[in-house]
Image (tube, helix red, strand yellow):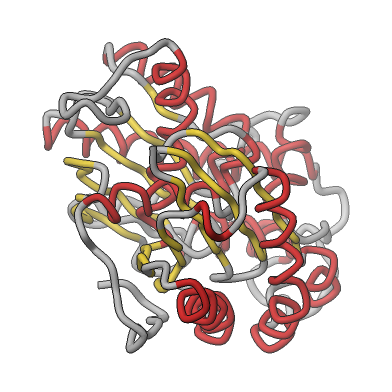
Amino acid sequence: MTLILGIESSCDETAAAVVRDGVEALGQRVASQVDLHRRFGGVIPEMASRSHLEVILPVIEDALAEARVSLADLDAIAVTVTPGLVGCLLVGLSVAKGLSLATGLPIVPVNHVHAHIHGALMPALAERAARGERGPDGGSPQPEWPLASLVVSGGHTSLYASRGPALHERLGRTIDDAAGEAYDKVSALLGLSYPGGPVIDRLAQRGNPRAYAFPRSRPAGLDFSFSGLKTAVRFTTHGPNARRGAPPLPDLRTEDLAASFQAAVVDVLVERLLQCAERIGARGLVVCGGVAANSSLRARAGEAAAQAGLPLYLPTMALATDNAVMIAGLGHWLFREGRIADLALDVAARAD
């Protein structure tokens, strides 16, 4: 049995979790900063860093208490080191280093985006482990590789060929806005609240997705682009010559705008995911990241997976957004492969 403490502080959630054997969460805590940043319409890095400093130790203590373990029971500390806001990442890494110095526990550096992929696998793998299934090496169960993995959030929209628990090759990414970022910006254009994803999703369920003919951008290869879609929504809601900060035009059907925008985003995401799956001969599909909580994306991905005869791996709603369960879960496999770091470890805003 392996117990890993995961620490996540890459953006605006401070999280800690204890995970057993890479699949079973024994204890977890998340302190969200959404209310702190809402009035600014986005994350303020300096404020986010200070908030992490204020809550990270109590968050870790609560996760350990819920898991009913102490630091002495752990095998390693997994911590997000890339990608993310540098000041935020440094808070988590500094705490991990302090705990490592105090206890002798090894530090396992984790890529936040790769961890999202593992987080989507965890519900299904935990069910298999509960039935007594084991992996080919006698450890925790694994899916059939390779998988076509779509990571879609406020900061990332990327496609990966996932060939193992810790082996992910990026095949496509956004060349401008991430899908979740486009949701936030369109929400602002419509005069709605932050974050934009949940509110647009709710409105879209009451709207007509064919009411507005918004574009579907398809750059070369498996890349994404959402800036043109955002601009099309702006011209529709404000006119081509509207000044910054101007109110939306009158008589707009907000529900139809939300539904039409969301349909354009989801169409491209699912289309690209299937193209990736065909290219690599995928044995399954993964959709993860904050936008994986979107009801339309979950439904469309499920339909596409069924038509392709492939299993679909989705995170629970709690694991869709940033969390430390996925960090500890992936950290288990990295630890098994001996991917530990010394105290010279540093963070990186962008992953390779």
Q: Quadrant of the N terminus?
A: top left
Residue 205 position by quadrant: top right
> Left or right of 179: which side holds 157?
left
Q: Residue 124: x and y, percent?
A: 44, 23
Q: Is residue 254 above or below residue 346?
A: above
- Residue 53 vs 310, above or below: the answer is below
- Name the residue rendered at 62%, 30% in the picture: 295
Of 334 and 159, nearer the camera is 334
Q: Is residue 33 left or right of residue 184?
A: right
Q: Quadrant of residue 301?
A: top left
Q: Give x and y (percent) for residue 342.
A: 31, 80
Q: How many labels does the image show?
A: 0
Residue 262: percent from left, percent from top? 59, 41
Instruction: Look at 83% across and 72% down and name the residue there.
Output: 36
Residue 346: image location, x then y, percent: 37, 85
In the image, 214 versus 198, the foreground residue is 198
